[in-house]
Amino acid sequence: MASEIYTRLQTLSFTRPSGTAEERKAAAFLAEEIRKAGFEPQVEGFEYTHRVPVRAEVTAILADGSERSFPVTGLIDSAETTESGETGEFFYLKSFDEVSLSRVRGKIVLLHDRLSQKEYRRLLEAGVKAYLTTSGTVRDTYENSDLETARFRLSAHGLQPLPAFTIRMIEAVELLRVKPVALRVVLRLEEKTVASQNLVVTVPGTDKAAETLVVGAHYDSVPFSFGAWDNGAGAVEVVQLLSALKQHPPRRTVKAILFGSEETGLRGSKAWVKAHEGELPQIQGMVNVDVGGSILGKEIVFVTAEDEAETWAKQLLREVGYAAVTTQRVMSSDCAVFSDHGVPSISMGQGAPRGGGYMHTRYDNMDLISADVLEAEAAFLAKLVLRLADAEVFPIRRRIPEKLRKDLIDYFGKEQSAAASLPPDEDPSLPFHF
Ligand SMILES: [Zn+2]
């Protein structure tokens, strides 16, 4: 017999990208499930703008003068070409070595993977005109793959975008085989305002109600993905947690937030933190769930807090007998937004073995979802949240250590990170703090 949590995830497992009717449908479904758990969710709407591709073309000009066009998409928030496009010699930039970089001036390059800040700086310095990155694997077929919609993220680091495209790996191979003498690329973007929503449930605390613990999970998916693993699982686990909190009212106030639009740049958590800035000093910590429920792979607990918090998390795992690895780092999810504002966070996630999970693709569906794993994760989430919410003294100090602040600034970019302006970190090892 399928469990309730599994059935919930089954219903939620449909493509629900940021700002779409499907995302609203998912929010409406989750709101209904929250009501069944005995709470009334608040729907908090928000808006953001980004520049989305409305026209993206890559045409190879071959040695015999013939042309061949390749299906591509443009990177959100990258740069436009003119209406008629840009033409440039084609270059395959296999690596960022000096020989390759000496040959790319004025050219349109094919490369792989997401660019680091350092690599992108070198690309700009080398005078590249536009670039293509790849999506998918060489084993894809055209019919069984989708073009990933990526975003140019380095503007926050003060870096000028270039016209940037995504091409399927199989088409990139083809592009190399036809040996183009030049490429003509067209990219037109349009500013779009996106409306999305967070669902917020306040579970009032009993005797420590002035202190708040936020528990969050995003419920949107990327286009093409059913978002069962990432992160319908987390959303239904938070709903399950609410049933546990109904049975056992927490001492501290618990604010459960199901975030919209995480996949387009943590938009839901950013909007929430902005709208509730005055409440942040009351928030002692944030527990996040992003990615879970798969029959394959290991459980991971990400700790964005001081060393002692990771020790505490490890101790809790031993105590309750939950098999997971811990790691102290910034996790790319809604919890990072809270930690960037000084709130320590713990995020539950799941890592797939190589070949055993395809995040942000059409293969993130119910096929690998296990009711047992969902139940186990939800049970641990409830223990973690209740342990934090009911502790006499909150087990995690409200500080972000220096090394993680640096990582947060690096993650969000100097111009957008709030961590840069946090009050100086007080080292708790100094005796006068006790
Ligand atoms: Zn996610």
Image: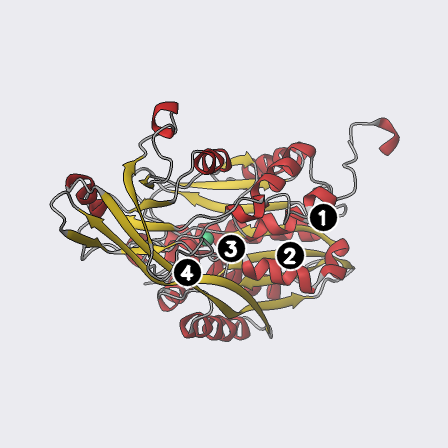
Which residue appears farthest toward the left when viewing the image? 64
Comes first in the chain, label 1 or label 2: 2
> Which residue is located at x 66 percent, y 67 percent?
202
Percent coordinates x, y for residue 92 in the rendering = 28, 36
Mark 3 is on which residue type?
Gly
How crowded pointer 1 is (Cα within 10 Å; few <14, some 14-19, many 20+) is rated as: few
Q: Is residue 428 left or right of residue 336?
A: right
> Which residue is located at x 49 percent, y 54 percent?
378
Closer to the camera in the image, 373 or 407: 407
Percent coordinates x, y for residue 395 in the rendering = 71, 42
Marks 1 and 2 sit apart, C-alpha to C-alpha, by: 15 Å
Marks 4 and 1 sit apart, C-alpha to C-alpha, by: 34 Å
Q: Which mark is residue 255?
A: none
How crowded pointer 4 is (Cα within 10 Å; few <14, some 14-19, many 20+) is rated as: many
Select label 4 or label 1 by which is in front.
4
Closer to the camera in the image, 389 or 25: 25
Kindly identify which residue carries mark 1. 391
Select label 2 or label 3 by which is in front.
3
Select label 3 or label 4 by which is in front.
3
Mark 2 is on which residue type?
Val
Kindly identify which residue carries mark 4. 221
Q: Secondary structure at mark 1?
A: loop
Closer to the camera in the image, 314 or 172: 172
Q: Which mark is residue 265?
A: 3
Percent coordinates x, y for residue 67 in the rendering = 16, 52
Mark 4 is on which residue type?
Ser
Q: Which mark is residue 214?
A: 2
Marks 3 and 1 sit apart, C-alpha to C-alpha, by: 33 Å
How crowded pointer 2 is (Cα within 10 Å; few <14, some 14-19, many 20+) is rated as: many
User: Quadrant of the rendered structure where residue 364 is?
Assistant: bottom left
